[in-house]
Amino acid sequence: MMKKAVLSLLTCICWASAPANGWAGEPFKKTLELQGYSFVVEATNEGSINKLKVIPSGLTKDNTQADSEIEGTVSGAEIGDLDADGFPEVYVFVTSAGSGSYGSLVAYAVNNGKSMTPIYLPSITDDANASKGYMGHDEFAVLENVLGRRFPIYKEGDANSDPTGKTRQLQYTLVPGEAGWVLRLKDITEF
């Protein structure tokens, strides 16, 4: 029984669905470090449209800050090395305003220790199996060598505030794309 409670607590800690520094209206700031590289992630979190900064350090060629405008608030940020190449990636989880709380991702990969490049997460609607019954309320987490995304499954007629289906978890692996990095859907499970 104790083992289940600890696992349940760890699961709650790892999955990001609410801002780590507070709710909308409170700025987000977190420093992430791995393998000698660090990233400061800052977001204004003042309304439905916000400014996001990812400030790298330790890169040998280009430590230029990445600035972007996001729709929603930053709900968490993690660092990992999903492809186990010895160079980290930073993952910033964004939650949209409104009752759907739709999740999105802003992410960057370190390229041979020199610079960072954006990581692309395809739209969930690109996969009919993954998106069936999807109405937001996403949670993200770096899980060993995959990026996890989970959300409640809505059955036809369910209100946005009351899903009656199971929970679906998607797992993505990091792979090289044509002009950068891509998170490719690897596995879909339901529980």
Image (tube, grey):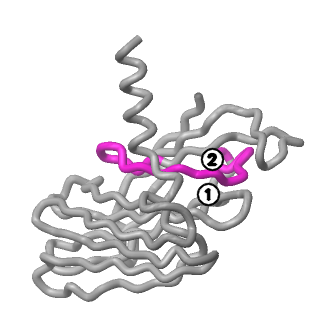
Q: Is residue 146 magenta?
A: yes
Residue 56 disc label: none
Residue at horizontal 64 percent and vertical 51 percent from the top: 137
Residue at horizontal 76 percent and vertical 41 percent from the top: 154
143 left or right of 75 in image: left
**Residue 156 x/y as whole percent:** 86, 41
Q: Give the structural element (helix, strand or loop) at label 2.
A: helix
Return the residue nearer the eye: 147 or 141.
141
**Residue 13 x/y as whole percent:** 40, 42
Per the rendered image, the range of residues in magenta is 129-148
The C terminus appears in which quarter of the rendering? Answer: top right
> Mark 1 or mark 2, which has the lower sequence index?
1
Query: Can you name the residue that lies furthest to the right here?
Result: 157
Classify residue 5 by image quadrant: top left
Return the residue nearer the eye: 137 or 134.
137
Residue at horizontal 89 percent and vertical 42 percent from the top: 157
68 left or right of 95 in image: left
85 left or right of 107 in image: left
Mark 2, Cα crowd under 10 Å, few <14 / some 14-19 / many 20+, is some
Classify residue 55 by image quadrant: bottom left
Residue at mark 1: 124
